[in-house]
């Protein structure tokens, strides 16, 4: 069962080509495309006719035979003859063996192109991974060299500078008592203790403290 492709996306999948390729064909051969452009303001997509599908399929058949777009433009009869020989499958019905072969070729080409893209991307990722590993190895070696130089420099500084015990501050010298000159060491006079209240009354009446 084959569904008739009408929108641009459906034609991409049916032909197995990329969106820029189909837009290029539309731009290079505008006189052969009958369907009017879609209305962007109303969000109406372009609906392609069967005549448009025949043109696209004919161009694809020529490109599969390595005929360039410049050659098609230079010799319009190439595309005209291919359009006359191109037939579309029966939409909604069973495909003929020729149509099945054509459909399988389109699917095979699409899968081959995708596989090639994935393979190229895998190669790019492998290259990026190898470069990342090389950078990591270079930085690791640089770190080890820097650490080794720092250890050597620290060891050399320890060998050149002997470690001395920390100095203890000297104890302050005590001054000897001052000599009065007569051989007796002058001592400070004792301070008198203050009188109690009872002693003050005794001095007041008797004139004696004891």
Image (tube, grey):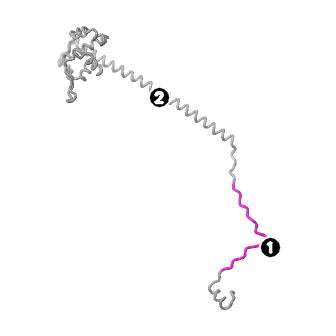
Kindly identify which residue carries mark 2.
Answer: 132
Assess whether residue 25 is covered by the magenta stretch: no
Residue placed most toward the observer, 115 or 50: 50
Q: Give the range drawn in magenta.
A: 168-193
Disc 2 on helix, strand or loop? helix
Which class describes the residues within 10 Å of circle 1: few (<14), some (14-19), or many (20+)?
Answer: few
Where 201 falls versus 56 (above or below)?
below
58 vs 122, left or right, is: left
Q: Residue 184 carries which label?
A: 1
Q: Which element carries disc 1, helix, strand or loop? A: loop
Asked whether the residues under the numbered discs 1 and 2 touch, taking CB atoms below 8 Å apart as contact, a structural biologist would say: no
Question: Residue 30's image quarter?
Answer: top left
Residue 173: within the magenta? yes
Residue sitting at the far right = 182
Q: Which comes before the other along the chain, label 1 or label 2?
A: 2
Q: Is residue 97 above or below residue 164?
A: above
Determine the residue positioned at 66% across, 80% down. Answer: 193
């Amino acid at each position: 069962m084959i569904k008739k492709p009408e929108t641009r996306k459906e034609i991409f999948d049916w032909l197995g080509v990329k969106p820029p390729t189909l837009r290029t064909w539309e731009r290079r051969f505008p006189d052969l495309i009958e369907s009017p452009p879609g209305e962007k303001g109303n969000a109406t997509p372009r609906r392609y006719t069967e005549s448009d599908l025949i043109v696209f399929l004919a161009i694809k058949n020529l490109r599969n035979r390595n005929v360039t777009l410049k050659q098609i433009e230079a010799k319009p009869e190439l595309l005209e003859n291919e359009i006359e020989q191109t037939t579309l499958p029966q939409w909604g019905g069973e495909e003929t063996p020729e149509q099945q072969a054509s459909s399988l070729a389109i699917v095979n080409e699409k899968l081959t192109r995708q596989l090639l893209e994935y393979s190229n991307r895998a190669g790019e990722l492998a290259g990026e991974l190898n470069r990342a590993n090389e950078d990591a190895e270079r930085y690791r070696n640089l770190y080890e060299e820097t650490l080794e130089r720092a250890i050597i420099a620290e060891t050399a500084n320890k060998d050149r500078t002997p470690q001395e015990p920390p100095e203890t501050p000297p104890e302050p010298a005590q001054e000897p008592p001052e000599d009065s000159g007569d051989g007796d060491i002058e001592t400070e006079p004792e301070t008198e203790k203050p009188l109690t209240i009872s002693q003050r009354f005794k001095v007041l009446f008797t004139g004696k403290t004891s």
